[in-house]
Image: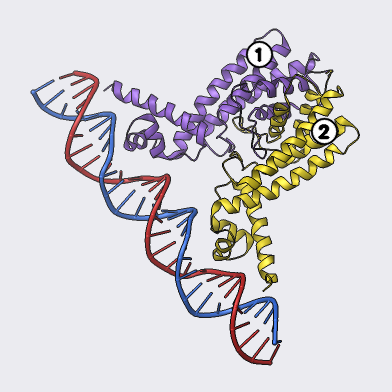
Chain colours: A yellow, B purple, C blue, D red
DNA sequence: CGCAAGTGGACAAGAGTTGTCCGTTTCTCT
DNA sequence: AGAGAAACGGACAACTCTTGTCCACTTGCG
């Protein structure tokens, strides 16, 4: 009894919809919202993911897989700064895209998620420390601090009431951050 | 018939509680939550602020007043970079403190808020352009872009699952941003 | 002391979410 | 093509959270 093709297609739709919804509105999205976004009935979503944790774990796993791919790519760059810059930008953009996801990962997802996260952090550390060793990246920050800075691309002039300015995207922020991170400024 | 002293005290408590609640949870906080935080009954909150807009306008006015004071102080610094640095840091920290306040200011508050906002933006523009004119601040960003960068201090390694690290506070972020903003890096 | 202003919190109404259930539709295998 | 199993959708009841009102009670002030 192989899995029916319509079931597979719906599963994919639900996951994609969940990712979009979570990215936009955070972990708090309702099942009905996800179902509507996916164009399926709520029952279908509940059947696939009987509880919230499973759903969120699936979403997180999906996001993390992309990030890990970027980190591998960064590590394979010959030029240490270029690799770092690629990773940093990639993480920043992804973080911004998933801005709704403000809660920590630790509380959600099981050991599989923890493993992916561990892998991503390990790769990132290598990319960062290689750039530091080669004297391209400032050394007065620990790799964790550098990683934390990737979140800075999620910029909003919130108290000021400046609109996000999606026209220029994250360019100004990333330029300034990378200039500030480069060694020997 | 002067205003009773207990009424005044409660009004202050409500405003303070509202600020705390809004800073933590955004504009969406419930009246009951604010009342509980303030240690008063809901009725008291409703009497003081019959509708949401009035409450939020009061909160925003309070925050903006602080920011305007900082901007004035920045403008009175003799050294242009020092002034800029002061303003930037002040805005960044306030923005981070009110991270819950992600919506734009425009939709809330009446003309009074708009006026305060206008005043703050005008002062900020002067601080920024003075630093640029004196060749201390990089010129390839418009003053609006520079201001937008203040939001970057609200850093969270959200997708990565790094905890906020309140121990070091915003220091690393601000250091890197300011280094990246300084002219002639 | 008296009374008007102010207070607190119970309460009803409404909005939004959760999770289930079952009649109907859609696939797959023969 | 036809039968049977698998999957689907969305109505629905239970529940949670918020709003906003109302009134018996308390408190500051003259």
Task: State the residue at coordinates (55%, 35%).
Answer: B100
Inter-mark Cα distance, 2 to 1: 35 Å
Residue A65 x/y as whole percent: 73, 47
Please state which of the two labelled residues, at mark 2 or mark 1, is closer to the viewer: 2
Task: State the residue at coordinates (62%, 64%).
Answer: A39
Report how many numbered discs are placed on residues in the image. 2
Looking at the image, is B184 positioned above or below residue C14? above
Of residues A154 and A108, the one nearer the viewer is A108
Q: Are marks 2 and 1 on the same chain?
A: no
The dot on residue B113 is none
To which residue does mark 2 refer? A85
Of residues A126 and A98, the one nearer the viewer is A126
10 Å crowding of disc 2: few (<14), some (14-19), many (20+): many
Question: Which element type, helix, strand or loop, lies under badge 1?
Answer: helix
Q: Quadrant of residue A104?
A: top right
The quarter of the picture where the N terminus of chain B appears is: top left
The dot on residue B75 is 1
Question: Which element type, helix, strand or loop, lies under badge 2?
Answer: helix
Residue A97 x/y as whole percent: 69, 43
Q: In the displayed structure, does residue A97 sit left or right of residue A131?
A: left
Task: State the residue at coordinates (63%, 61%).
Answer: A38
Of residues A36 and A102, the one nearer the viewer is A102
Q: In the displayed structure, does residue A42 sit left or right of residue A121?
A: left
Residue A33 x/y as whole percent: 56, 56
Q: Quadrant of residue A179?
A: top right
Residue furthest right in the image: A78
Of residues B69 and B21, the one nearer the viewer is B21
Residue furthest top in the image: B78
Q: Is residue A96 visible?
A: no
The quarter of the picture where the C terminus of chain B appears is: top right
For disc 2, the chain is A
């Amino acid at each position: 009894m192989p899995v029916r093709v319509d079931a597979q297609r719906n599963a994919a739709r639900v996951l994609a919809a969940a990712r979009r919804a979570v990215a936009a509105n955070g972990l708090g999205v309702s099942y009905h919202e996800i179902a509507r976004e996916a164009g399926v009935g709520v029952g279908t979503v509940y059947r696939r993911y009987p509880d919230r944790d499973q759903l969120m774990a699936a979403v997180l796993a999906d996001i993390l897989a992309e990030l890990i791919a970027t980190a591998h790519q960064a590590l394979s760059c010959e030029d240490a700064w270029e690799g770092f810059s690629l990773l940093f930008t990639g993480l920043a953009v992804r973080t911004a895209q998933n801005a709704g996801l403000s809660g920590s990962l630790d509380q959600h997802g099981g050991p599989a998620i923890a493993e992916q996260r561990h892998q991503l952090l390990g790769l990132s550390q290598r990319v960062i420390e290689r750039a530091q060793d080669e004297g391209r990246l400032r050394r007065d920050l620990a790799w964790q601090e550098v990683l934390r800075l990737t979140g800075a691309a999620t910029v909003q002039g919130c108290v000021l009431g400046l609109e996000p300015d999606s026209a220029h995207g994250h360019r100004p922020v990333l330029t300034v951050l990378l200039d500030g991170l480069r060694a020997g400024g």
